[in-house]
Amino acid sequence: MALIKREDVDAVRERARIDEVVGAHVTLKPAGVGSLKGLCPFHDERSASFHVRPQVGRWHCFGCNEGGDVISFVQKIDGLAFTEAVEYLAERFGVQLRYEDGGGPRRSGEPGQRHRLMEAHRVAAQFYAEQLFTPGAAAARTFLAERSFDRAAAEHFGVGYAPTGWDALLKHLRGRGFTEAELTASGLVSQGNRGIYDRFRGRLVWPIRDVTGETIGFGARKLYDEDQGPKYLNTPETPIYKKSQVLYGLDLAKREIAKTKRIVVVEGYTDVMAAHLSGVTTAVATCGTAFGGDHVRVVRRLVGDTDAGAGLRLAGGSSGGEIIFTFDGDAAGQKAAMRAFGEDQRFYAQTFVAVESSGMDPCDLRLARGPEAVQALVDGRQPLFEFVIKTTLASFDLETAEGRVNALRAAAPVVAGIRDTALRPEYARELAGWLGMDHESVRRAVTDAARRGDAAGGRSDGRGEGRDQARGGRGDGSRSDGPRGDGGQQSRPAAAERPDRSDPVARLERQVLEVVLQYPVHTPPDFDDLGPDAFSVPAWRAVHEAIRAAGGVTVAGAAEPATWVGKVLEEASPPVVTLIGELAVAPLPEDRESAIEEYVRGVVRSLVEMQITRQIADLRSRLQRTDAEREAEEYGRVFRELLDLEGRRRVLRESSQRD
């Protein structure tokens, strides 16, 4: 495989905005001057420990200890090889790549598989969209018109039509240079005894896009009675399409979701369209599968769902986010609600359910009563706990003693499954009222269900402990180094072991390295006067060695922070690379932009003064051990060196006072 020229890779790193790339997957919030944070996309966590520092072009998670630059983020989030990640970013940010084997762009067919599959889907989406307005697509246009979706709506959501023939798309893609192997891997065609043929034929087609807006698959609804296939047919699992991780409409909804901290989960493509056209622009839908754990992780990252608001939720207030599920009022909808209740245990945000009394979905509701009715449906949501409990009770005859007792037995585990312990007594009282039974009997039944561990929806004694311990953590989400986060202590090489953060000297040494990496332009030249023994902690000494090898602040002052950190990383040994990435992203205790320069100079000069003071103590000790008469020359040399150091310290202190 041809190698991309080094200077072009550097250009991609410089041009690709890491906050923009990461922000497509994670809702980032300010975390001090020049720092952003959010929930890590690579492991489950309760508190935001994933940090991004755009000015140095780095990200780091203090929970799972993953980190890197914009290229490594794309590699990890999309499962790409290095070259594929660079090519993706180059195309997105307009960087022309050159290759070592001749200096020109790659020859046709050479780009990585993901790039080719994405391109095939882009071409297919355009083809289907154009077909929607041909004479043969009358049935598709009628389907849309009957649901009050006009041409503008179809174009906004990219809706298209797959012709009835066996190879219309196949011929089109072959004409664009795609090979049979690429088409087979894309999921756009199916394999038969006589070769490959179009997977979608005679169907209305919706493009399924990832969070960045790239088409990665399709959902298709049948239109003709002679079609013997399922009502809805989706793209199969492919290298770029994982249905358990995809939410239809997320590319259109993500900004409003991040802004309002609300997401509405509906059941189908037309429901998403109807909701958005009714003003509910945070609506998304799963793609041919139930809402599951992978979807939860996607939603939590975008909503910014952390335990920071848990206390508010326990107190009956807003936790800062809402997850609203809409379900049909039939048995299937009730079953879906019970599944959602199980996933509720993974959220800190409040979960709700919105079900229209007559059983209409958002698409039917908009058609029958207008956009206002869809908005009213969402605004009239009820807590998911309440819906599930009442749904459970509905299957029993509460007019009989036997029915009430059996209903209590069925509903008690549901109440016991509410993860917020402060809410359980409240719902136990509600349950007693709905059953017409005394509160004490109901309370006992709920307590017994919790004790037996048969609580519906998951654990009944809190959240997350089991998952934390399974990952090797302590279960309390705490760490002794860096911001609080999940994941427990990581296994690191000895050279990368951190000291106790309560050690003031070790803490100062770390702070100095943080500011030198993040704000080299504000770092005083005194830093370069620090000798190889200035850092007492082996890990920090190793980082200092890499900084010195990169040229120190003399070189750093003439470079962009991202370029400077890159130079330091090049000089570091593998165990130290992670340390440098962490220090380059770590949030600083000073959160005022106007005070950053003073903070940087202050911590650096504190360490310089500490080293000078240490050297002064050593010289005084040596002077006491030296005979002034018999070793007059040595005594004079040490004495002059001592005076020089004391003078330097005095100047340093006076300079600090002036600043």
Image (cartoon, rainbow, N blue to C red):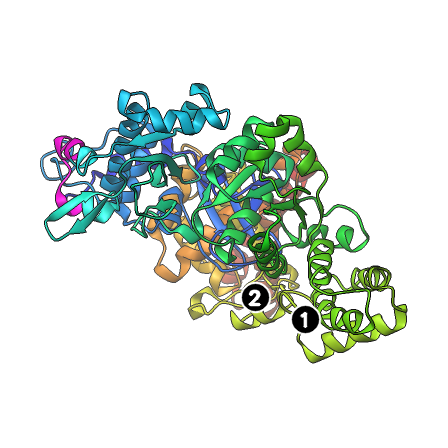
Quadrant for residue 161, please give it. top left
**Residue 598 belongs to the span the image colors magenta:** no
Between 309 and 263, the one nearer to me in the picture? 263
The residue that label 1 is drawn on is 455
Q: Amino acid at mark 2?
A: Pro
Q: Nearer the viewer, residue 325 or 329?
A: 329
Q: Secondary structure at mark 2?
A: loop
Task: Confirm whether residue 283 shows in the render.
Answer: yes
Q: Which residues are magenta?
A: 171-182
Residue sitting nearer the eye, 389 or 602: 389
Please name the residue that numbered disc 2 is placed on: 499
Q: Position of residue 349 (x, y in %)?
A: 67, 50
Going 47% across and 62% down the picture, which residue do you hit? 539
Residue 14: x and y in percent read 37, 33
Q: Is residue 278 left or right of residue 229?
A: right
Q: Which image quarter holds the C terminus?
A: top right
- State left or right for residue 553 relative to residue 398: left
Q: Is residue 343 above or below residue 119?
A: below
